[in-house]
Amino acid sequence: MRKMDNEQGKDNETSDRKRFSFRINLFFFSSFIIFTVIIVRLAILQFVDGPQLKQQEASNVTKNVPLTPIRGTIYDSTGQNRLAYSTPVQSLYITLSKNYSDNMEQLRKPDKKLLPELENMTQKLANRFAQYGNKDEPKMTAEQIMDAMDRNYQRFSGFTPRLIKTNLNKDEVAYFMQHKSEFPGVDVVEETVRHYDPDTVAVQAVGYIKSYKSARETLDKYKNIQKSMSAENDPGLIYMDNESVGFDGLEYQYQEQLRGKNGYKTVPIDPRNMPEGVDSVTPPQKGNNIYSTINKEIQVKTEEAITDQLRWLHSHAVSGKTHPYAKTGFAVAMEVDTGNVVAMASMPDYDANYWQTGTISKDKYEEIKHVYQNATIKNVGSGQSGQHPDSTVLLGSTIKPLSVLIGLEEGLFTTNTYYQDTGAAYFGRNNSSRVRNSSGHVYGSMDPATAIRHSSNAFMVDMVGKRLYNKYINNATEAQGINVWDRYMKEFGLGVSTGVDLPGEFKGLLEYTDKGESALSRLAYASFGQQGKYTPMQLAQYTTMIATKGKRMEPHLVSQIKDTNGNVVQTFKPKVLNEVKFPDAYWNEVIRGMSTDVSAFNGFPYDFARKTGTSQQSVGRELKDNGVFIAFAPRQNPKLAVAVVIPEGGFGAWSAGPVARKIFDAYDEVYGLDGVPKKKDAATADSNAVKQP
C-alpha cells in the first residue's frame, strides 16, 4: 500500500513538473511574441509612420485659414472715375466644430445626435434668412444650406470655414451678431464684391475676374503661383479657391499689385483636424490702386462714335451700296510723345459686371462670347467662321507710307523720282499678273508723296515690290527680298509685340512668309497692303512711329500705381523700344503725302497727317472691303495718333475716317491737340489727371 502511494506521488510530481515546464515555455513564448510585436510596431512607427506623424503633430497645433483680400481700384486718367472697384459686403460663414460626415468610423460608432443637430441648425438658419432677408431675393432652403456646409468634406478641410450666404443686409447682420451663441461656429465676415463702371468703359481693356480655382485650371500664372510665393512663411500670400483673381486685361496684368494680401484666421486644431480653442485674426491688406491712361470722356465718345458709325453704314449707301455686315469696329488713340493709350475701343462691348462674382452663367456667356475679348490687341472671330473677317484685317493702303520709306531707304528711288502711273502694274512670267489702282484710276506722272496721296497701287508694285525683289535676286536665296521686307515691318512694330501692358497680344499674321507663292508675287502684293494682317494697336504704334520720325514708343495703359494712403508705388515713364534713323527728307516726303481728302475732317482746325485704306480680302469665296484709317495731329508737333478699323465697312475714308475725327475732337476738348483744352470746364474736370511728363 505504501509502495503504491509512493509510485502515485512520483507520477503526480512528474505531472506537476510537466505542467510547470509547459507554463514556463508558454510564458517565454508569449513574451517573445509580445516583444516581437512591440519591436515591429516601434520599427514601423519609427521608419514608416514617423515622418507622417511628425508632420501631423506640427499641423495639429494651428492652421492659418485665409480671409479674402481687398482688391485695389482701377481709376481712369483723371483719378475721379472708377473703372473697377470693390465694395464691402457682409457674409455668413460656418466652421464645423464636430465631425458630421458619413465616414466609416462614424458608421461603426454612430452618434445619432450629430446629424439631427446639424439639420436643426440648417433649418434655423433658413428660417432666419426668410425672416430677416430681403423680400425680393430668393430664399435659401435648408437643403441648400446643408450643401454649402459640405459636411462630408468633399470641398473643404475640417477646419475651413464654409460660406453660407453673402451680401447680408443690416437686419441679418444684427441678428446673427446678437445670437451668435445660438449658432456654434457661425461668423459674420466682411468681404468685397467687384464692380465695373456701369457705362461699360473700356471693358475689354480693364478685363474681368474669375475664381482662383477656375483660373488655375487655365492659366499657367495661377498654376504656378503657390510655388513662386513664400506662402509657408507668409500666410497672407496663400490663395483661396473661392478668391477672385484677374483673368484678362488690367485685372490680370496687374494682379499682384491689385490683390494686396489676404488676412488669415489662426485656428487651433486637434488631432482629428477639427478646430478647438480660441482663434486669432490678422486682417487683410488692401491692394494698390491703378491709375489708367484711359480717359473716360474720350473713351465713351470713341465707343459712341463706332456704334453710331456702324448704324450709319447699315442705312446709308456709300459708292452705291450699304454695308449691313459691318457689325464691329475697333479704335486705339495713343499719345505720340508718351505712349499713353487714352482710348481703346472694341465694339460692341458688354457689361463686365456679368463676371462680378468670379463666375458667369451659361446664358450670359453665350450672349457675350464673341465680344468679351479685346479685339484691338487680339485676333477675335465674328462667330461666323468663313463668312466674315476676323478682327485683324489686311492693312490695305495704310501700309503705303512705310512702303515708300522702304523704297527710299533701299535706294530704289529718290524723293525726286517721278513715276508714270498708267492705272495698273504687271509682274510675273510674261507679265501674267496685274494689279490695278482702285476703280482703275490713272494718275499720270507722280513723285513718291503724290503716290501716297493718290494711293497708287501701281507705284507700289513697280517701284517697291518689283525693285526690292530684283535688288536681291542675285543673292543666295530668292526670298532675300522677303527677309528685307520682314525686317522693316518688325522695326515698325508690325509682326511683333507692341509691348503694351495687356496679356494675350496677337503679333499679326505675316502672309508674305507663305511660300505657296513666289517671292516676287508676295512682295508685289505686300507693297500695297495685301500680305499682312495686324491689330489696331500695332497700327497705332506704327502711326506714332511715323509721327515721331522713327521712335517706336511702348504703349501703356497705366501711368501710376499708388497705395491706399496715396503714396506713389510706381510711375511709368515713356519708353522707346527701338529707333529707325532715316534721313529727314524721307520722313518729310512721306508725311507730305499723307494728305488724302477725307470729308469727315472738313472744318478740322488742325493740319494733320492721314492715310485711308480699303483692304480687300476673300472670305467665304466673297471679297470683303474693310475700312482702315490712320492719322496723327497736328502735322507739326504731333500730339495724338489714331488707328481705326471697321471690318466690312467699305472705303476707309467713309467708314473709319468719321470715327477718327470724333476721337481727335474729344481729345482736343479734354487735353487740347495744341496743349490747350477746348472744353470750358476741362481744366477743372481733369485737374487731378495723372499725366506723364
Image (cartoon, rainbow, N blue to C red):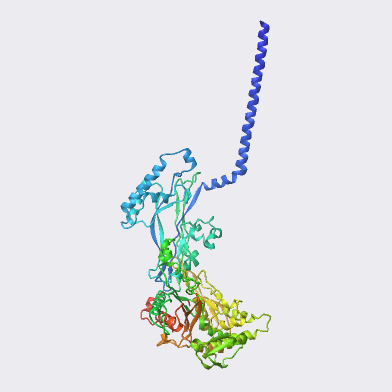
Q: Kindly tell me whether residue 363 is visible in this rendering.
A: yes
Residue 364 higher or lower than 445, as above or below: above
Q: Is residue 189 left or right of residue 463?
A: left
Q: Is residue 297 left or right of residue 450?
A: left
Q: Is residue 267 left or right of residue 17?
A: left
Q: Quadrant of the N terminus?
A: top right
Residue 551 in picture, x, y percent from top left:
54, 81
Q: Nearer the viewer, residue 439 or 603?
A: 439
333 vs 347, nearest the viewer: 347
Res 691 visible: no
- 13 lies above or below 366: above
Q: Residue 149, how many percent across, how many down? A: 42, 49
Q: Position of residue 78 (x, y in %)?
A: 41, 73
Q: Position of residue 276 (x, y in %)?
A: 46, 45
Residue 564 against residue 44 in the figure, above or below: below
In this view, 77 is above or below 458 = above
